[in-house]
Amino acid sequence: MANLSLSLSLIFRICAFLLLINVSFAKTLKRDMKALNEVKRLVGWRLVYSWVGDDPCGDGVLPPWSGVTCSTVGDYRVVIKLEVYSMSIVGNFPKAVTKLLDLTVLDLHNNKLTGPIPSEIGRLKRLKTLNLRWNKLQHVLPPEIGGLKSLTNLYLSFNNFRGEIPKELANLHELQYLHIQENHFTGRIPAELGTLQKLRHLDAGNNNLVGSISDLFRIEGCFPALRNLFLNNNYFTGGLPNNLANLTNLEILYLSYNKMTGAIPAALANIPRLTNLHLDHNLFNGSIPEAFYKHPNLKDMYIEGNAFKPDVKAIGAHQVLELSDTDFLV
């Protein structure tokens, strides 16, 4: 029995040693080395200074490049995360990044990237997080983004994107967070986005969007997981639809600074988890139904800048709502 135990222990140690050898001698995939060295030649000095050597995953002597995370797959190491933000990277979006086919995280936020997102972005089928906010990216969004079927987090806010929001975003069935605020998008928000069963946060504020938000909720059973909806500072018209009350997980509804009209439906007071309701600076009229004032969770209701009756009162202390993207990553 003792000999058997000794044999098993020896076998375990040999296997562990062989595994260590395999990891130690695993080579970085040439495809990934070539792609990131191409990026290295194009970007600013800050990044080049921290990317020493030719192997982004490290060669055993030099460490892995800053912001690069690798993983061993079989006999090779591949790049799975590229997180290079706040580095003053200038120039067009580095197309070579789209050759890193094993990427799960691409985070280039808070740089000075310009130009369009290349259509080749659709190659990154394993991508879960795409964070490009706080750049100077331009042009229309490529419909190929809709091919990133593993994507859960999409941050494109604070850029100069224009044109219509592509309906292909509705193909991102795993998507939970969609931030496209502070751009120059025009047209209507595709109603197809309502089919995203896992979407928890949608921020399309501060764009040039038009139409009635009734169109956004025309698909039965839409937005079942939605908690936060920001449509402020656009050009939406028309009234509030009764079927907004079907968004039973909704907590924040931010509609400030649009051109919406009509009375406030009492049905909206039936949204059980609603905490923040921003209706200010529109063209609403009439009275606020009493049910809103009896809502157990409603902390803030902003109503100024409308045509409500004089006796209509707000709810809450009316502090400016300033939330960052990370406030919703829960």
Image: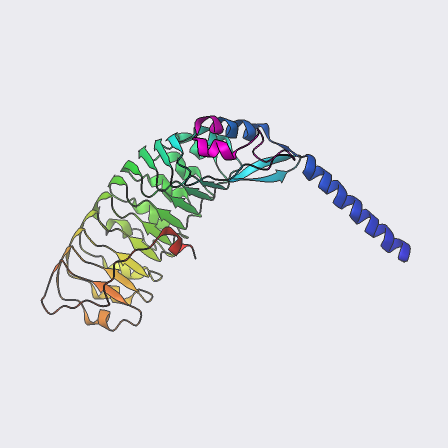
Q: Position of residue 232 (x, y in %)?
A: 24, 51
For the point 19% across and 72% down, the residue is 290
* Relative side of 77 to 47, left or right: right
* Relative side of 225 to 278, left or right: right
Q: Is residue 296 magenta?
A: no
Q: Position of residue 286 (x, y in %)?
A: 11, 64
Q: Position of residue 38 (x, y in %)?
A: 49, 26
Task: Please tell me whether residue 144 is drawn above or below residue 222 in the rendered image.
Answer: above
Picture quarter containing residue 131? top left
Foreground residue among 275 and 272 = 275
* Relative side of 103 to 320, left or right: right
Q: Position of residue 319 (x, y in %)?
A: 25, 62
Q: Which residues are magenta?
A: 39-63
Is residue 173 in view?
no
For the point 63% across and 38% down, the residue is 73
Q: Main secondary structure of the magenta part?
A: loop
Picture quarter containing residue 315? bottom left
Foreground residue among 196 and 154 = 154
